[in-house]
Image (cartoon, rainbow, N blue to C red):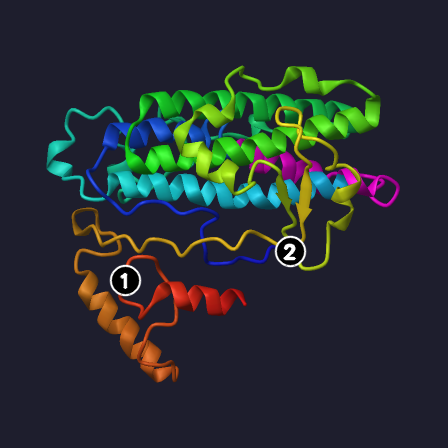
């Protein structure tokens, strides 16, 4: 089962200048062959299909747990695309090649790549052979890292830079995790392959705050009680920095999501959003909910979001 927490794994900036062309580029990190949908679905199906779990529990726990983190990465990519599309005037997009965001998506992310081609299941590799699947996963994370670096170079929008800075660090953790699993299983020395592609993550400014916080060393456990045996695999020295790897026994604390404004020209959530808000308020009152909305968002209107988040987390 999946437990969903309404927070983002990292903080993203609020909408600023719209960048529809940049949003189309970021779509590659969603539905491309090496995008976050591919990492999620590869690890998810490998965990679904995994045989002999009790006999090889540390390796199963590793794959299944990383799959859970990838679900949140998809959310971050979508949030970034949505942020970059906020404020776009659809009367001005005739020259844009990527019209799917307006025709189908309501100025929102789509399960597609930067060409508009839908993500498809042929990107999933789940052979059942543990060494083969782990090798594929290392390759997949390497290709994903390359894609993030390219998107970083192509997009200077603040949201895209914040996204790629975070995902480069967290994807690097997964790359290390699968390399470490292969080392434990086969005796191969994977450390000589790092960094791959051969640019140190620490050189990228948007990565540096996450590295200073130790995010390049931490593998979070995304379950209250399960996946405890990942510590048998994810340990030892980081192949680039020599620092000790660590398993954190809870998900990251996360950040409240941005509450993006309505976009009536694409009926998101409606051509008259205030009418829906009135209906929602009546339903809330009839259900006995408090006058104040219970959800927490990052951009005001909630009476001190920082303190609320701290209270919720403690």
- Report whether 6 appears left or right of 228: left
* 13 or 74: nearer the viewer: 13
On screen, 54 above or below 111?
below
x and y percentages locating residue 79 in the rendered image: 37, 44
On screen, 286 above or below 118?
below
Disc 2: which residue = 1
Bounds of the magenta segment: 37-59
Q: Nearer the viewer, mark 2 or mark 1?
A: 1
Q: Main secondary structure of the magenta part?
A: helix
The residue located at (51%, 58%) in the rendering is: 5
Residue 269 is inside the magenta segment: no
x and y percentages locating residue 219 in the rendered image: 64, 42
Disc 1: which residue = 300
x and y percentages locating residue 96 in the rendered image: 20, 26
Rounded to the nearest angstrom, the CA distance separating label 2 from label 1 is 32 Å
Q: Quadrant of residue 89?
A: top left
Residue 30 shows up from this direction:
no
x and y percentages locating residue 36 in the rendered image: 50, 34
Residue 40 is inside the magenta segment: yes
Q: Quadrant of residue 205?
A: top left
């Amino acid at each position: 089962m999946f437990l969903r927490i309404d927070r983002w794994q990292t903080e993203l900036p609020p909408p600023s200048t719209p960048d529809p062309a940049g949003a189309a580029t970021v779509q590659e990190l969603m539905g491309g062959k090496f995008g976050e949908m591919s990492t999620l679905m590869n690890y998810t199906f490998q965990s679904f299909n995994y045989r002999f779990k009790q006999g090889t529990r540390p390796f199963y726990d590793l794959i299944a747990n990383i799959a859970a983190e990838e679900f949140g990465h998809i959310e971050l990519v979508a949030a970034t695309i949505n942020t970059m599309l906020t404020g776009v005037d659809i009367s001005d997009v005739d020259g844009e090649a990527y019209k799917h965001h307006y025709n189908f998506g309501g100025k929102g992310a789509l399960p597609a790549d930067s060409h508009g081609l839908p993500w498809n299941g042929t990107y999933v590799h789940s052979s059942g052979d543990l060494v083969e699947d782990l090798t594929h996963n290392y390759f997949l994370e390497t290709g994903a890292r390359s894609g993030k670096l390219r998107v970083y170079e192509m997009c200077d929008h603040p949201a895209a830079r914040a996204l790629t800075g975070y995902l480069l660090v967290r994807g690097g953790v997964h790359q290390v995790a699968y390399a470490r699993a292969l080392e434990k299983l086969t005796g191969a020395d994977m450390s000589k392959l790092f960094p791959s592609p051969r640019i140190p993550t620490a050189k990228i400014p948007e990565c540096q705050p996450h590295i200073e916080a130790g995010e390049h060393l931490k593998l979070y456990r995304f379950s209250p009680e399960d996946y405890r045996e990942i510590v048998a695999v994810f340990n030892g020295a980081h192949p680039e920095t020599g620092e000790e790897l660590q398993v954190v026994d809870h998900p990251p604390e996360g950040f409240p999501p941005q509450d993006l404004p309505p976009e009536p020209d694409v009926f998101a959530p409606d051509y008259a959003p205030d009418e829906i808000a009135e209906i929602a308020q009546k339903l809330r009152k009839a259900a006995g909910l408090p006058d104040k909305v219970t959800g927490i968002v990052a951009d005001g209107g909630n009476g001190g979001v920082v303190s609320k988040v701290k209270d919720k987390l403690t």
